Image (tube, grey):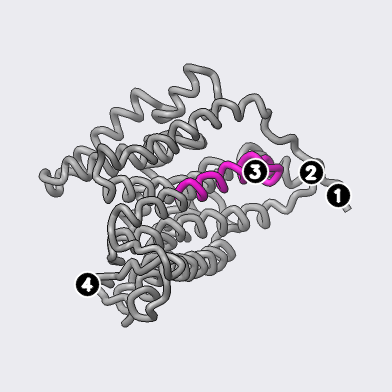
């Protein structure tokens, strides 16, 4: 049998700058509700976690998925249905939504992971479209109306989440917890193997690594974390709708990741904040918001080829 070689983890010195950036990010989101509308901040954190989950797949494994909206949206539907119809507590609703996305990611990954490049992307898109039409027709999703007036309930049956002030700390903990999990994954030996597969899959295969298995695990982890974001978002807005399973949502997460910085730890967070801010403050433009987003994206790609965080990291020559 082939002998596998252990890949060295990232240098601890490089992590110091990431730790400083994490403390600043956590401090910002902790005090930001004093100056910024909490619902807006919670939306940013949900989409930031979604983008970070997507970046785990494309940025560190090199797999482009055009169907990540199916994990975000399906987790939202299951979480909303469990909270409203079954009357479960919010933590159970989020866990059920996350479990649903994890199972869906395992099946989707099993079907798509053996394909490469555009074929992998098209399979994920096709599967996401199947989930979209299922969501449109399934009785429990509410069709075009979605699931509305979802109760937030009480966390562990004790802490009331009906107000923004009560919900915000929960979303903050979920976001920071998901972010730290991704950080741990990419700085672990497992994460180093994923990077090796991204850089040179035949070489990783020659070292004895089952690359398809590693890619499948990474796909499931990415889909699961996207599900956490979707389940949390459904409770924040008390709504689960077709918007979150539409193909355009899969396109938005690609835009967030590229804009912030592909393959960077903090890039998806910055990219999600920029996109959500544009959608919020340019809403009066109607359909023209998409055009404006496209123009800004083109400008950023031409001016910041590595993304916003990628360019900053390149200037200071430290990983972010």
The answer to whether residue 15 shows anywhere in this view is: yes
Where residue 235 sits in the image (x, y, percent)?
A: 34, 63
Q: Nearer the viewer, mark 3 or mark 2?
A: 3
Q: Secondary structure at mark 3?
A: helix
User: Residue 2 got which mark?
Assistant: 1
Q: Which residue is mark 2?
A: 207
Residue 79 is left or right of residue 314, and the answer is left
User: Residue 191 got which mark?
Assistant: 3
> For the residues marked 2 and 1, what is the alpha-carbon distance in whole angstroms?
7 Å
Q: Nearer the viewer, mark 1 or mark 3?
A: 3
Magenta stretch bounds: 175-193
User: Residue 145 got which mark?
Assistant: 4
Position of residue 212 relative to residue 59, above or below, is below
Q: Earlier in the sequence, mark 1 or mark 4?
A: 1
Tag 2: Cα neighbours inside 10 Å, few (<14), some, or many (≥20)?
some
* Residue 265 counted in the magenta span: no
Q: Earlier in the sequence, mark 2 or mark 1?
A: 1
Position of residue 270 relative to residue 96, above or below, is above
> For the residues marked 3 and 2, what is the alpha-carbon distance in whole angstroms?
16 Å
Residue at figure coordinates x 62%, y 26% from the top left? 14
């Amino acid at each position: 049998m082939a002998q596998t070689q252990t890949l060295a983890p990232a240098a601890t010195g490089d992590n110091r700058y990431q730790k400083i950036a994490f403390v600043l990010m956590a401090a910002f989101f902790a005090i930001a509700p004093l100056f910024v509308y909490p619902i807006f901040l919670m939306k940013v954190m949900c989409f930031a976690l979604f983008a970070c989950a997507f970046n785990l797949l494309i940025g560190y494994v090199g797999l482009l998925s055009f169907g990540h909206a199916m994990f975000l949206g399906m987790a939202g539907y299951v979480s909303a249905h469990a909270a409203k119809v079954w009357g479960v507590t919010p933590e159970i609703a989020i866990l059920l939504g996350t479990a649903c996305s994890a199972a869906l990611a395992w099946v989707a990954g099993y079907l798509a992971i053996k394909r490469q490049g555009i074929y992998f992307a098209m399979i994920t898109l096709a599967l996401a479209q199947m989930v979209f039409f299922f969501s449109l027709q399934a009785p429990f999703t509410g069709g075009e109306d979605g699931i509305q007036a979802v109760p937030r309930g009480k966390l562990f049956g004790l802490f009331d989440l009906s107000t923004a002030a009560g919900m915000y700390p929960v979303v903050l903990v979920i976001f920071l917890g998901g972010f730290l999990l991704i950080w741990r994954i990419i700085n672990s030996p497992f994460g180093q193997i994923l990077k090796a597969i991204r850089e040179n899959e035949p070489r990783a295969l020659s070292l004895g690594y089952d690359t398809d298995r590693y890619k499948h695990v990474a796909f499931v982890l990415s889909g699961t974390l996207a599900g956490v974001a979707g389940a949390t978002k459904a409770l924040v807005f008390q709504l689960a709708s077709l918007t979150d399973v539409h193909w355009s949502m899969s396109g938005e997460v690609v835009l967030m990741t590229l804009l912030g910085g592909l393959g960077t730890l903090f890039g998806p967070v910055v990219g999600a904040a920029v996109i959500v801010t544009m959608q919020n403050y340019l809403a009066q433009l109607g359909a023209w918001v998409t055009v404006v987003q496209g123009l800004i994206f083109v400008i950023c790609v031409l001016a910041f080829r590595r993304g916003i965080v990628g360019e900053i990291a390149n200037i200071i020559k430290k990983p972010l």
